[in-house]
Structures are given as C-alpha cells and as structure tokens.
Image (cartoon, helix red, strand yellow):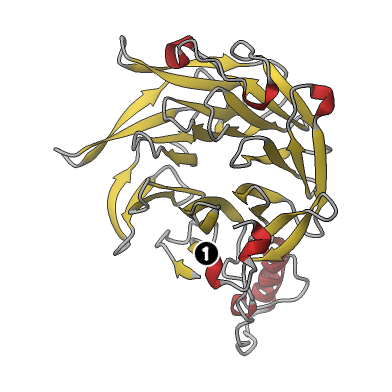
Amino acid sequence: MSKEELLAQGQGISCHSWNADKSMIAISPNNNEIHIYETKSWKRLHLLSEHDLMVSAIDWSDATNKIVSCSHDRNAFVWTYEPTSNIWKPTLVILRIERAAIDVKWSGDGQRFAVASGAKCVPVCKYEHSQDWWICKMIKKKFKSTVLCVAFHPTNGQLLATGCADFKCRVFSTFSTDVDGTNVDPGPFGTSLEFGEPYCELGSQSWIHAVAWAPSGNALAYAGHDSVIHVATLQPSPAEQIVRTIRLKGLPMMGLLFLSEKAMVGIGHDFSPSVFVDNTSTGEWVYYDHLDKNKPKANKPAATGTVTSNARALFQNKTDRGQESKVDSDTLSTSHDRVVSSVRAVTTGASGVTSISTSSLDGKLVVWDLPSLEIDMSALGI
C-alpha cells in the first residue's frame, strides 16, 4: 500500500478521479475548487474554480480526456484541455434543476453523462454539434425523492442505474438516436425501451447511497443506509431478478466498486475499505476482509487541557469515530480517520482490478495495491 496525503488545507477531499493513464488526478478539497495534480511529483498543475458552491462529484472520461464536474450550485461543467494554452476550458451545462447536483458519471464512450440531483430527476447530457453546446434530456419517471447516485452500464451507454432516497434502485434506458443511431442494445434485459423508460425497479429498506455494475454488466450492486448491500443478477423478466443481500455489522457504505465478477469493495463510515466476495459454495455474497492491514500506532501520553477542551474533544471523538472515550487520532489502526468519500480503480488487469484509490474527509488519498496486501487474490477471482 502506498499513501499520498494531499495538502487539502484541513478541508478533506470530497471526490477524486484519474485520467486514462493515471498520470494525473483531479480532486476537490471539499469546496468549490478542483485541483489537478501530476502524480509523479504530486505537483499541482491546474486550479479550476468556476463553481460557486461545493463540488459534489468529478468524473474524468478515459475515452475523450474530458472532465465533468457537478456542484451544489445546480450546475455542471465539462472541462476540455487545450494544449496550446495549457488551460482547461470550461463549458457550462444548463441542467435545468432547482436543487443541488449530487453525482455525475460519464458513459464508457464519453458521449454522454448523467447527473443525480435533489430535484427528483436525472439530466442525461449529450453534445449537440450543430449548436456547439451540451444539452440535457430529463429522466423524471418514478423518482419520489433525491437521486443520490448514478452509474452507466460498463459496456453499454444505453443503460443507466440510479439510486434514490425513495428506497429504490432503478435501471433506465438512455437510448438516443443522435448518439446511438439505430444500434439498440438492451443489455441483459432482452427488450429495448425508449429514453427514460425503466427496465427494472429494485427495492431496499433505506436510501440508496451507491450503485455499481459488475464488469460484465449482468449484475448490479447497490448499498443502502440501513447497512445492507444488495446484489441483483439481472434477467429479461422483472419477475426473474435475483437479489442477494449482505447485512453489515458496521456502518453504511457510501461507495461500491467491483474488483471482478466475484468480488467488490465498499467504502464509507468505517474508515477502512471492506471486501465482499461471491461464495460459490453457498451462492451468497459475504464479507471477506478489510484492506487496511496497518498495526495500531503507539499511544501518545494523554493530553491535558481544561474541562471545556476535554469535553469538546470527547464529543468530537463520539461524532467522528463512535468512541466513548477520548482517544488520540494516532492510536487509530486505519489509514483514514474520517469518512471515506470516494473510491476509484487505478490498475485493471485482464482478470480484474488490482489496485484502487480512496479519498477521505481527512484530506488523504490512499492507493491500495491489492497483491501486496494479505489477501488471497484467487479468492477475489483475480
């Protein structure tokens, strides 16, 4: 495991995304700015500050090298790099939403992106060449609350998974003749639908914080606020969907990433990424291990202070770490000591993802090299 602590000035990192060859990374230090670093020297190359409020999500397209960002200011920007002037040129995308933009994802081909919002809708945006502008088309059906997360099918930009605060995970058609022509691909569902029509609706008992597709696109995982992860094996008939559950002992997951068809990693309030695998003997998804193998750090002498400062430290410890006693942060056995806000694949081999990165509100970016950890890679299907 290698660790890089970015200088986020104590504000934490709300989201991050890599470029295609992983030579650069874009992060937001939990404010309205986007910082782009060169990863050899970790030198900051660019500062993007067009947003007015906190940047909630960033996605960097491997196919087009464009960055899309969304913010609580209800706007999205598409950033295009201009080599001659060495600047990232922003293009404002009018989303036509009256609430904050929560999440944003490119499709695999970089031809469109989708934005989750608090306005009970999902704008799906594509580039209009005749007008030299990004235009959006709304998915409004079914949503009864804030859409918290979105994810395009890994091989098919015509399928979009959404997670909503109305306790539902849904898959919608994003087919567009302007982008797809007449090549309709319904994926695992068998029958094609028009734009905005739902292919399936999967239930939960709480808000859906994260959605993720398996590499093949035949399975979909979604994590709820009730500390439960559901894994659905998708079928042509809605009545045939097979949904398996993983009930966690800890706090809810805020992000999911498939490592292979047989394994995925979850991040969230427990500070350490957790690995889950498909147990072939039982046919169920189960908790396998956590990635953080650090040993507890040596205790420092107990800090002294006034009654007021000690009480404040005790309250902060309860809210930040769920601990009843005042414990110095150096006694934590995890690399992160705040909620882990985002997870990304760094290295992907022929059989699956071999290294990932996580960012946290503690201001750290950690790169986890899976083969170097005490994990049986064959158990992960890698």
Q: Quadrant of residue 100?
A: top right
Using residue 358 as the reference point, say whether residue 79 is left or right of it: left
Q: Quadrant of residue 231?
A: top right
Q: Is residue 174 above or below residue 337?
A: above
What amino acid does circle 1 point to? Trp
Report the residue marked by disc 1: 368
- Percent across and percent down for residue 89 are 27, 33
The residue located at (64%, 69%) in the rendering is 375
| Left or right, residue 146 beside residue 96 | right
Residue 17's spot in the image, x, y percent? Answer: 44, 47
Which residue: 44% across, 66% down? 5
Q: Name above or below for residue 374 compared with residue 127.
A: below
Residue at screen point 60% across, 61% down: 338
x and y percentages locating residue 277 in the rendered image: 72, 55
Return the residue nearer the eye: 368 or 9: 368
Image location (x, y in percent) of residue 227: 78, 50
Q: Is residue 175 visible?
A: yes
The residue that appears at 52% across and 59% down in the rendered structure is 354
| 15 or 302, nearer to the observer | 15
